Image (cartoon, grey):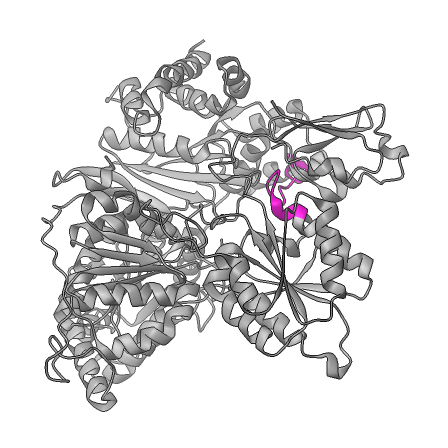
Amino acid sequence: MASIHLAQDPYNIIITGVGGQGNVMASRILANMLVKRGYYVTIGETFGASQRGGSVMSHLRVSARSSWSPQIPKGRVDMVIALEPTEGVRVLKNYGNPQVKILTNTRAIHPVGVIAGELDYPSMEKIKNWVQELTSSAWFIDATDEAVKLGNPILGNIIMLGALSGVGVLPLDREDFKEVILGSIPQDKLDINLKAYDIGRQIIKQ
Amino acid sequence: MSYLMDNTEGTQYLLMGNEAIARGALEAGVRIASGYPGTPSSDIIESLAEIGKDMNIYVEWSTNEKVAMEVAAAGSFSGLRSLCVMKQNGVNVASDFLFHLAGSGTRAGMVLVPCDDPGALSSATEGESRFFARLVEIPLLEPGDFQEAKDITKWAFELSEEIRNLVMLRSVTRMSHASGNVKFGKLPRDGAHAGFHCDGFILDPMEGPMMSTPVGYKHAQQQEKMKKAREIFEDCPFNTYDGPEKPEFLIITSSACNLYSREAISILGVEDRVGLLKLATTWPLPPKLLKGYLSKTDKILIVEEVLPFLEENVKILVAEMAPEIGIKTFYGKNDGVIPMVGELNPDLVVGALAQILGIDYKAIPDGYMNKAEGAGISETPSRELTFCPGCPHRASFWSIHNALQLDGRKGFVCGDIGCYSLAMLPCGFSTLKTLHAMGSGGGIASGFGKLGQFGFDQPVLAVCGDSTFFHAEIPALINAAHHNSDFTLVVLDNSGTAMTGFQPHPGLKVDALGDDVTSVDIAEICRAMGARVEIRDPFDLEETQKTLNQLIQDKGGLKVLILRQICALSPEKKARKKYEMTIDEEKCLGENCGCNKVCTRIFRCPGLVWDKDKNVTKIDDVLCTGCGVCADICPAGAIERKEAA
């Protein structure tokens, strides 16, 4: 596990989604898992005016050398984790490059303009085509659907982290996950979180 | 136990910049911490409040920033290291006391941490605190990464004791709200004892009274302190240089811009051409240190956010040193390579550096960009800012808007800072027409309310939140009461400082440390001023609108309407529905109703969804908080509410 070397240094990850999806928690857990492996991790978060329903984005820089800018430069993201599909497309436009990889949750969250009937939300088929065209590898994961089966849609973020561990580009260790997540949840929620992590991992491995 | 209390030296944690500052204060043995909530600063006091009891620290959310600084000063005067935290705008509020304090000096180490918000990501101005340090003549420190944010905070307390004056430690959003690795130092043992020595000779800094007079003597003494600080800064370990011995080009920077500049040098691969001087001591600048680096090259780029503070101060030094170091060429704000508005990022610094060095750089290859443009990006719907589902403000502004429309005399609302600032947008029915500082809604309304003699006949309303009421609304209200100004103040009381994360305020029965405290009643304060006071639940639209209409018609001077309903996101209310909401699809006539979809199009609560296929509205059960308000806006009675079990 520890033998995985970073494909780039810094290795740049963007976790994107909508307020209330557990974006900030996912970025902290991922970052702390990597700090345990001895890396410097810098997180930049966009929140404040993003009330529930607004776009939320976390930038993670993973490096064996030092801390980096909390904002990833344009065109320099290596891995996108999209908790919401159109948010993933938006990130690719600004930060993508031909080598970028993406993990996309398939569950859409409609903006107010769409639920008010003024704007249209693109079909999942269209989104998949765009994403495939703009990335070198793309995984589409029914994370929210799987999380609902587990009893809580918020676990979608943990399923996505499990999926990232399955991709194998980062030294993500299940034991580290266990230790780190216990810092932010009560003991009795551990099993369900581990289950979510494993489901994500399996989806990629299959 | 909070990890901030971990006393294992050398252990490493991932900390937010704000947590790193809090940890630095802990390592310095801080005993008093005060502040007023404001993004991006709030987490510093919050994380200290959480462990205040365990660590024997007195932590408070003060009424406003000026009071916070006065509270912290009392700690310093009594021999306790004290910390005072606020967002930049707070420094404006505290500045009157700040001038006096800088003149009187301090005793135990006292550090003021303002967090600026370049780009105004969560502010209504992008004001600067750096200029205050120069204006009131106190030292200014700026950390350049997360480890330094901790280390320099501890150092700031030592510096403050060295010169016996307040030290400003300035952070910015991208430092405060970003996270990085931080190695811990030791926590000191608690040996705090407070006592104020004030019977000594009037000019004795440690035994005499604390005051900024006699001004001539104290001001001269203050300037001596600044000279001493400048001497110390010459050898400050946090001023660092990276780059070749004789660089072709020198970047001078500080704060988060240090990280952007490092990244830009790395992206362009110009490590052997460009030197990077990162300054942590940005006022007063250490001249000898600067002279050493300025002698190495003739071309200098200053990278900083918003106004040219560093740039102008460096230019003054260079002018003075010109006979020795020669003429320099400057790049930065004045020639426009670095913008003077908005926050910076690595791309903007890459752009500036590439332009100056004549390097052709494209962040995104044309081919990829064209593909991205072609990939229907324009078809991805944008996410507009809106009030949360079940937000009391939506209901309040619905009533205010309707009451003003019914009145028909072009009435308007004066506002200030809070979630309710959003009422300038369609989500608040564009009701808010002035937006300025905390409490300014009431002050401006007080002025409008006196224009009757010039023929002014528009009804005037002001809004403020419950925390804002205590912070800055009271003096405006007293002014209005005393001058019999004709307007109505609507207090949007959602029981906490909601926008910044539910920090307690004087209207509540609990304080920052979780102790039971005396609550101060907003209605009683207003009644004591002689105002007519009404209290309503904004979710009761009919009663609220009726009351508003009466108050607008009442020519009797100052009127106050308190709209009381807890924030939908507050910990005590979250996930508790009062009503189960349903749509009677028989009654909802959709496009054929004539209501023009008032619920989804105008009222626009995210819990209401327009179902295109069925031509009816539906409820999103996950988002709906069950406030029940939408049942009262549907003219067909199709939205039904039932008490939740």
Is B209 left, or right, of A59 in this rendering? Answer: left
For the question of whether residue B359 can be seen, the reply is yes
For the question of whether residue B302 can be seen, the reply is no
- Please name the residue shown 16% across and 72% down the image: B164
Is B380 left, or right, of B518 in this rendering? Answer: right
Is B543 left, or right, of B364 in this rendering? Answer: right
In magenta segment, residue B303:
no
- Split into 4 quadrants, where in the image is the C terminus of chain B? top right
The correct choice, above or below, for B294 with respect to B39 in the image is: below
- Split into 4 quadrants, where in the image is the N terminus of chain B? top left
Residue B13 image point, x, y percent: 24, 38
Residue occupying the far top of the picture: A206
- Please name the residue shown 52% across and 39% down the image: B569
- Please name the residue shown 46% across and 45% down the image: A46
- Please name the residue shown 17% across and 66% down the image: B78
Residue occupying the far bottom of the picture: B216
> Dividing the picture into quarters, in which one does residue B356 lie?
bottom left
Q: Is B524 in front, or is B305?
A: B524
> Dividing the picture into quarters, in which one does residue B642 lie?
top right
Is B74 left, or right, of A73 in this rendering? Answer: left
The correct choice, above or below, for B626 with respect to B215 in the image is: above
Residue A14 image point, x, y percent: 44, 36
Q: Is B323 in front, or is B77?
A: B77
Q: Is B45 in front, or is B78?
A: B78
Residue A139 image point, x, y percent: 50, 20
Residue A58 image point, x, y percent: 43, 39
Specify the segment rendered in magenta.
B375-395
Q: Main secondary structure of the magenta part?
A: loop
